[in-house]
Image (cartoon, grey):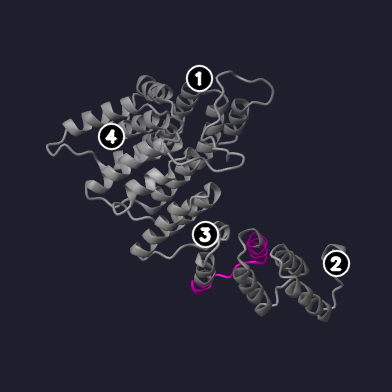
C-alpha cells in the first residue's frame, strides 16, 4: 500500500451514529411521536424522523415504525413508506434491524417485502458492515438463479456503495471492475468516491494501477489522486496520474493542477514551470495565496526561474501584494541573489509601500 498522507489523518465521516442504549430527556423518539400527532407523515419527512430515531436507539426502530405504518393509510402509501424505512438500517450496516423490520411488516401488516428489494437491502447491510463473506454468499445465490451466472448490475452497485461506506476500497473496486467486465458503465461518481476512500486507507496507488486502462477516471477523481500525491510526496504516482489523464483526454481540475504545482515546486527542474504554464492554458488562474506559497518553496528548491515567472504573472494581474514582495525578496536572499533583492526596494517604493524591518534585515 502507499504511505498514508503526512499530518493529522482526515476524519472519516460516519455514515450512521448508532447508540445501543436509549437516552432520556428530549429524545428523538419523543420528538417523532409529538410530530406525528400533527398529521400524516410520509416521504422525506418520515425518513428524517425515522433516521433520527434509528441513530438514537436502533432497538426500538422496527416496532415503532411498523406501528406507525398500521395507521399510515392506503396500501400503496404504506408500501412506499416501508421501502424508505428499509433503506435506513440497510445503509447503516445493520442486517439484523433490516430483517427485523421486514419480519415485523409481515407479521403485523401482512405486507411482504418484494424479494428483489429485500435482497438488495440485505446486500447493502452486509456490505456496509464489511461482511464480505456474507455478501459473496448472497451473490453466489444470485448467480445460481441465472443461466449466464452473472449478477445484476444493481446488486454490484449496491455492494460497491456499501463497501465504500465501510472504508473497503479494494473490495469496492473489485465490484466496480466486475460491473465493467459484465458490460456496464461504471458511474463517474462511484470512481470518485472510490478514490476518496482510498485516500483515507492508503490504497490510492494500488487502486490507480489496477484501474488504469480498465475503468475511466473522471476529472474530479484526478483532483483527489493528485492531492494525495502532494500529501505523500509521491512524484512517480503524480507523473502516472498526469499521463493517464492525457491518454484519456481528460482535463485536470484546477485543484489537481494546484496539487501538482505544490508538489513539483519542491524539486529543481522545469516540471513546475511546465505545470504553471499548463494551468493557465487550461483556463485557470492561480490565486495570490498559492503563488506566494510557490515563491516561498522556490527558495528551498533553488528554483528562482519559477519564482520570477510567478511574480511576473502576479504583476500582470496587478495582484503582487506586499507579502508577495517580501516572499520573493526572501527567495532572492536565500539563494544569494542580493542585487535582485535590493532591486525590489525601488519597485516597492513606486507602489507607495515602505519596506518593513524584516525586508531591511
Which residue sits at x=26%, y=26%? 137
- Label 3 near label 2: C-beta < 8 Å? no
Along the line of sight, the residue nearer the viewer: 344 or 131: 344
- Would you name the residue on which mark 2 appears? 360
- Would you name the residue on which mark 4 appears? 116
Above or below — where is 216 with respect to 69? below
- Would you name the residue on which mark 1 appears? 59
What is the quadrant of residue 74 in the picture? top left
Earlier residue among tags 1 and 3: 1
Q: Main secondary structure of the magenta part?
A: helix
Which residue sits at x=23%, y=38%? 151
**C-alpha gap between disc 4 and disc 2:** 75 Å
Earlier residue among tags 2 and 3: 3
Q: Is residue 216 magenta?
A: no
Return the x and y of residue 14 as percentages of the image width and height.
54, 35
- Label 2 near label 4: C-beta < 8 Å? no
Q: Is residue 46 left or right of residue 1?
A: right
Considering the numbered disc 3 on the image, is that residue within a helix, a strand or a loop?
A: helix
Earlier residue among tags 4 and 2: 4
- Label 3 near label 4: C-beta < 8 Å? no
Return the x and y of residue 342 as percentages of the image width and height.
79, 74
Q: Callout 4 environment at 10 Å: few (<14), some (14 to 19), or many (20+)?
A: few
**C-alpha gap between disc 4 and disc 3:** 46 Å
Above or below — where is 81 with respect to 226? above
Which residue sits at x=65%, y=79%? 316
Q: Which mark is residue 260?
A: 3
Amino acid at each position: 500500500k502507499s504511505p498514508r498522507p503526512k499530518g493529522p489523518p482526515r476524519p472519516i465521516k460516519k455514515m450512521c451514529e448508532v447508540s445501543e442504549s436509549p437516552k432520556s430527556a428530549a429524545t428523538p423518539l419523543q420528538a417523532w411521536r409529538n410530530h406525528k400527532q400533527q398529521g400524516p407523515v410520509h416521504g422525506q419527512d418520515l425518513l428524517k424522523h425515522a433516521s433520527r430515531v434509528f441513530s438514537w436507539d436502533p432497538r426500538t426502530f422496527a416496532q415503532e415504525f411498523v406501528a406507525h405504518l398500521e395507521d399510515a393509510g392506503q396500501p400503496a402509501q404504506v408500501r412506499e413508506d416501508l421501502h424508505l424505512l428499509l433503506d435506513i438500517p440497510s445503509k447503516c450496516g445493520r442486517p439484523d434491524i433490516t430483517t427485523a423490520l421486514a419480519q415485523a411488516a409481515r407479521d403485523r401488516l401482512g405486507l411482504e417485502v418484494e424479494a428483489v428489494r429485500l435482497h438488495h437491502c440485505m446486500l447493502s447491510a452486509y456490505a456496509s458492515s464489511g461482511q464480505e463473506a456474507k455478501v459473496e454468499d448472497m451473490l453466489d445465490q444470485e448467480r445460481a438463479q441465472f443461466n449466464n451466472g452473472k449478477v445484476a448490475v444493481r446488486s454490484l452497485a449496491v455492494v460497491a456503495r456499501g463497501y465504500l461506506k465501510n472504508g473497503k476500497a479494494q473490495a469496492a473496486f473489485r465490484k466496480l471492475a466486475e460491473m465493467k467486465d459484465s458490460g456496464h458503465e461504471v458511474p463517474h461518481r462511484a470512481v470518485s468516491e472510490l478514490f476518496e476512500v482510498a485516500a483515507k486507507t492508503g490504497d490510492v496507488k494500488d487502486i490507480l494501477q489496477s484501474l488504469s486502462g480498465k475503468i475511466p477516471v473522471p476529472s474530479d477523481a484526478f483532483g483527489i489522486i493528485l492531492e494525495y500525491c502532494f500529501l505523500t510526496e509521491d512524484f512517480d504516482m503524480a507523473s502516472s496520474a498526469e499521463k493517464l489523464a492525457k491518454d484519456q483526454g481528460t482535463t485536470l481540475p484546477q485543484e489537481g493542477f494546484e496539487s501538482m504545482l505544490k508538489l513539483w515546486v519542491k524539486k529543481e527542474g522545469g516540471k513546475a514551470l511546465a505545470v504553471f504554464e499548463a494551468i493557465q492554458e487550461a483556463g485557470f488562474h492561480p490565486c495570490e495565496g498559492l503563488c506566494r506559497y510557490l515563491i516561498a518553496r522556490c527558495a528551498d528548491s533553488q528554483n528562482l526561474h519559477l519564482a520570477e515567472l510567478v511574480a511576473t504573472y502576479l504583476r500582470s494581474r496587478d495582484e503582487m501584494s506586499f507579502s508577495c514582495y517580501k516572499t520573493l525578496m526572501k527567495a532572492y536572499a536565500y539563494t544569494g541573489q542580493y542585487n535582485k533583492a535590493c532591486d525590489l526596494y525601488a519597485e516597492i517604493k513606486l507602489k507607495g509601500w515602505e519596506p518593513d524591518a524584516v525586508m531591511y534585515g
